Amino acid sequence: MSELFANYLAVVAMVLFGIGFGNLLLQKNLIKKIIGLNIMDTAVYLFLASMGYISGRLAPIITDGDTDARKYVNPIPSGLVLTGIVVSVSVTALMLALTIRLYRRYRTLDIDEITLLARQEHNE
């Protein structure tokens, strides 16, 4: 049980990922699905950031000439998180733009109704 509390950020990240994944699977509204995907993204970023941080180490900015790698935190997880955030914002913008186009065409955000209407259009 003590390891659970020691790794509480990883546990929170897993719970957030589960919430987002459940939202993505169970919701029929496209906007709610996009929100679920964003919650999942946030969980992954939290997990990467929490695993990349080492208590007692410094940011990897060398100011005094000391290049001993054991004194610094690995900068790669932070770089991955920043890159992921940029990609996530772009993907979210694209999904929202496509959702707007679908709404203008079918006048609904329900994925089941959109599928039904698209099949009816295709069969005509």
Image (cartoon, rainbow, N blue to C red):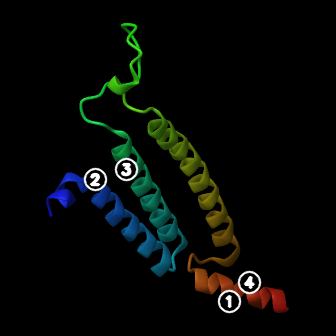
Residue position for label 4: 118
Give the alpha-carbon distance from disc 1 to disc 3, as whole Å: 38 Å
Displayed quadrant of residue 44: bottom left
Residue in front for this viewpoint, 111 or 43: 43
Which part of the image, by quadrant, shows the C terminus?
Answer: bottom right
Give the alpha-carbon distance from disc 4 to disc 3, as whole Å: 38 Å
The three-letter code of the residue at mark 1 reads: Leu
Residue drawn at point x = 40 percent, y = 56 percent: 43
Residue drawn at point x = 40 percent, y = 64 percent: 17
Q: Residue furthest top?
A: 64
Foreground disc of the pair 4, 3:
3
Contact, CB < 8 Å: mark 2 with mark 3?
yes
Residue position for label 3: 46
Helix, strand or loop at label 1? It is helix
Helix, strand or loop at label 2? It is helix
Vertical side of 28 occupied by 64: above or below = above
The three-letter code of the residue at mark 2 reads: Leu
Helix, strand or loop at label 4? It is helix
Q: Earlier in the sequence, mark 4 or mark 2?
A: 2
Residue position for label 2: 9
Q: Earlier in the sequence, mark 1 or mark 3?
A: 3
Residue position for label 1: 116
Residue in front for this viewpoint, 3 or 79: 3
Give the alpha-carbon distance from disc 2 to disc 1, as whole Å: 42 Å
Q: Is residue 108 left or right of residue 23?
A: right
Foreground disc of the pair 4, 2:
2
Give the alpha-carbon distance from disc 2 to disc 3, as whole Å: 7 Å
